[in-house]
Image (cartoon, helix red, strand yellow):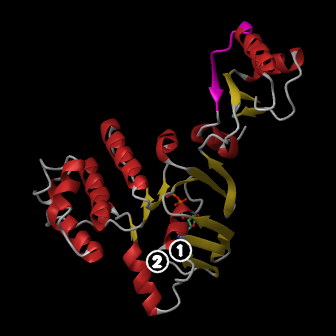
Amino acid sequence: MLKLKDISVIYKDKTVLNKLSLTAEKGEIIGLVAPNGTGKTTLFNVIANFLKPNSGSVTFLDQLEYKTEKDELSIRKILVSFPDQGDLFDELTGVDHLNLYASMWKGTTRHIPEVIEQLRMTGYVKKKVRTYSLGMRQRLCFAMMMAADTPIMLMDEVMNGLDISNVALISQQLMKMKQEEKLIFVASHLLENLDLYADRVLYLKAGGIIHQQSLDESTALYIKIDIDREQYERLSQEYKLPDDHLFIANHLCCIPIDQMDEDEQSKWIERFLASKVKELTVGPLGTMELYEKFYVEM
Ligand SMILES: Nc1ncnc2c1ncn2[C@@H]1O[C@H](COP(=O)(O)OP(=O)(O)OP(=O)(O)O)[C@@H](O)[C@H]1O
């Protein structure tokens, strides 16, 4: 559905994206994770053609590129970007904004009442935007994407300023949209939330994708224990920890268990429990844990 090939973006002497390649299919939610200033927005800007890369190609549906006006128009019809709160019109109502997006992309506004109901906006959507709180504006921005209802959606910091119940509400909608076979990119700093709905999470560093984590059964499993460095060193002396174990951000020791039989797995768990670790869990590495692995300096 979308193919990026060797995308490079260079600002003066700073290379933000360096020959980045990526293929994405319909029905996927792809999380994009990196510290501030790494290039997430730049990547979205390239996909949406708000920014021409210095080199590389962006291809939609195996054939459409931003090379001719006709192709660009066809791409505009299938792709929508998360609106910036600053782009909302204070003197228009929420409904006006929804009608605008629905008419521009979908050509009908018939589905708007359903969007309003699903996002629980009935109480305020007919008021002018200037009366909205930050969270209400953010929900409106999300509703505008639902109103556009395009097959591809780029969502930059979609959860910004939302309280816990609204994060849950939007997450629920994202899962519904996935069932509708949309391709959705979500750049977010709300890492644990991504684990809920993303099919894979891409970690950006030094202009490229340094890791892709698929969140399915094939993901490697670990025994994870929360310990400080002193405890870690004691454990390493006492037992030979497997060569491919991880000690992440000075607090999380992870032992891979896929290659172990049940006896060996139980032995490790018993050892850790005997050493009175603070917390022990078994499972794949979550987005938060991988973030610490890749970005938190030791
Ligand atoms: N127009 C520009 N001119 C020069 N440098 C720019 C420009 N736009 C972005 N940059 C630089 O490119 C880098 C990547 O910026 P980008 O906004 O893509 O990061 P991001 O990962 O989206 O960050 P955040 O999490 O803060 O939104 C930053 O170092 C930024 O300063």
Vertically, is 271 above or below 281?
above
Numbered label tally: 2
Residue 61 on image: x %, y %? 52, 76
Place of residue 247 in the rendered image (x, y in percent of width and height, measured from the top left): 75, 31
Q: Position of residue 181 (x, y in %)?
A: 44, 59
Could you tell whether 226 is left or right of 1 in the image? right
Verify whether residue 276 appears in magenta: yes
Label 2: element kind: loop
Q: Quadrant of residue 246?
A: top right
Is 185 one of the magenta-colored residues?
no
Q: Amino acid at mark 1?
A: Val
Labelled disc at residue 46:
1
In front: 288, or 199?
A: 199
> How far apart are labels 1 and 2 at the CA level?
6 Å
At a point 24% along the width and 76% down the height, the residue shown is: 107
Circle 1/circle 2 CB separation < 8 Å: yes
**Which residue is at 53% across, 90% downward?**
67
User: In the image, which residues are magenta?
Assistant: 274-283
